[in-house]
Image (spheres, rainbow, N blue to C red):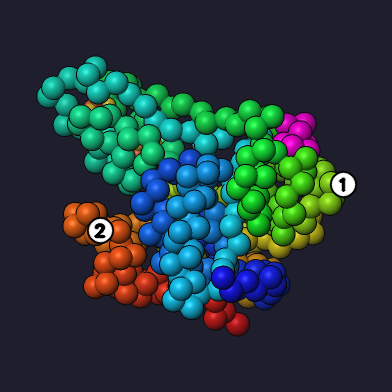
């Protein structure tokens, strides 16, 4: 496999970093393999997936497919959290409790096609976006957290051998953050970056506290402020909101590259460039929901044929062309 150790760092330094987000609780192995392969071939610098051995194996199969076609190997990042977090949950309901006449709004709003009449929520597909929760008029849908036990972090990291870890945090969790960080360090796995994903409400003082914890343990930060976590939206509004948050907060942030995330889409770069000099402080972008949604029709077509997208010779070039349209403006940003 081609390994360009500094490709990711170079991209962060020049504002051209692109990360594909598979989803911190997404265990749809077939889609993860397909999407990791397509986005790696499109040139992303990092793929970010759930801390799950089967998911990581699926992502690595996709990366191997891309490498066989000349791609450089992106960093493999896995996501952890320091407590309850919307990125680490799944929806659940008992389908036999649903009234037969229900028009099934839950099914219609699910972007991951994770809800069916017979099975309820297909856990592997659910990535915890939460859209179905308010959609049920009877309030039958619950959310269930996916917490990782403290003593399982180090062995899991040793097993998965990621290049980077993303740690999701929330306001008021300084201690839990530090403890998670200690568990990561105890794994002994050398990490290129420790990305911190924080909601817009996390204040500057807390961000500096997180920075201090990272520095004390020798981790190099990568900041991700989530304007609209898992919005999966493609409109101008979300692109504007994510960029506005970055511009508003960047002056009070601790040192380290800052990546645009949470509501990113095709319009994000144009929105960013309107901010002139402030745009120069953006190290790059992460694409999650929009990246999946873009390729969903092709994923469905290959699924209908019972063939992986990466093996469908007439479909994957179409997927690659669409992925490149999303990613290339960032890779070539000047
Ligand atoms: S709408 Fe979101 S939370 Fe609900 S089942 Fe689908 S992916 Fe899971
Ligand atoms: S909307 Fe509620 S009642 Fe209707 S199918 Fe979904 S979970 Fe069941």
Residue positioned 24% across, 17% down in the render: 97
Asked if residue 317 shows in the view, the reply is yes
- Of the 4 image quadrants, the one containing the C terminus is bottom right
Q: Position of residue 173 (x, y in %)?
A: 71, 32
| Residue 182 located within the stretch drawn in magenta | yes
**x, y percentage for residue 102?**
17, 26
Name which quarter of the figure residue 202 lies in: top right
Name the quadrant of the N terminus.
bottom right
Residue 78 falls inside the magenta stretch = no
Which tag, 1 or 2, sits closer to the chain's start?
Answer: 1
Tell me which secondary structure the magenta stretch mostly adopts. Answer: helix
Is residue 167 among the parts visible in the rendering? Answer: no
SS state under label 1: helix
Question: Would you say the residues marked 1 and 2 are in contact, meaning their CB atoms lie under 8 Å apart?
Answer: no
Q: Name the residue furthest left.
A: 101
* Span highlighted in magenta in the image: 175-183
Residue under pointer 1: 216
At horizontal 23% and vertical 35% (from top left) the residue drawn is 116
The answer to whether 13 appears left or right of 307 in the picture is: right
- Label of residue 307 in the image: 2
């Amino acid at each position: 496999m081609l390994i360009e150790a500094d490709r990711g760092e170079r991209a962060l330094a020049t504002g051209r970093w692109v990360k594909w987000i598979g989803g911190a609780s997404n265990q749809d192995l077939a889609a993860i393999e397909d999407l990791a392969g397509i986005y790696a071939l499109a040139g992303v610098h990092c793929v970010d997936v759930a801390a799950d051995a089967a998911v990581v194996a699926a992502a690595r199969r996709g990366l191997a497919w891309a490498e066989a076609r000349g791609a450089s190997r992106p960093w493999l990042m896995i996501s952890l959290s320091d407590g309850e977090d919307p990125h680490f949950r799944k929806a659940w309901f008992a389908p036999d409790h649903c009234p037969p006449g229900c028009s099934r709004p839950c099914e219609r709003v699910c972007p991951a096609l994770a809800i069916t009449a017979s099975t309820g929520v297909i856990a592997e597909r659910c990535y915890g976006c939460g859209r179905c929760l308010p959609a049920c008029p009877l309030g039958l849908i619950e959310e269930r957290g996916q917490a990782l036990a403290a003593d399982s972090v180090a062995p899991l990291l040793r097993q998965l051998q990621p290049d980077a870890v993303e740690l999701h945090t929330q306001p008021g969790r300084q201690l839990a953050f530090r403890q998670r960080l200690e568990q990561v360090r105890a794994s002994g796995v050398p990490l290129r970056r420790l990305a911190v994903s924080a909601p817009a409400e996390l204040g500057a003082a807390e961000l500096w506290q997180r920075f201090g914890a990272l520095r004390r343990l020798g981790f190099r930060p990568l900041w991700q402020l989530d304007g609209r976590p898992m919005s999966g939206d493609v409109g101008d509004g979300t692109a504007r909101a994510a960029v506005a948050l970055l511009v508003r907060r960047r002056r009070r942030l601790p040192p380290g590259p800052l990546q645009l995330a949470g509501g990113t889409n095709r319009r994000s770069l144009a929105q960013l460039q309107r901010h002139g000099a402030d745009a120069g402080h953006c190290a790059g972008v992460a694409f999650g929901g929009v990246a999946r949604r873009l390729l969903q029709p092709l994923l469905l077509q290959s699924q209908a044929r019972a063939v992986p997208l990466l093996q469908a010779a007439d479909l994957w070039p179409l997927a690659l062309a669409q992925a490149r349209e999303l990613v290339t403006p960032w890779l070539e940003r000047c």
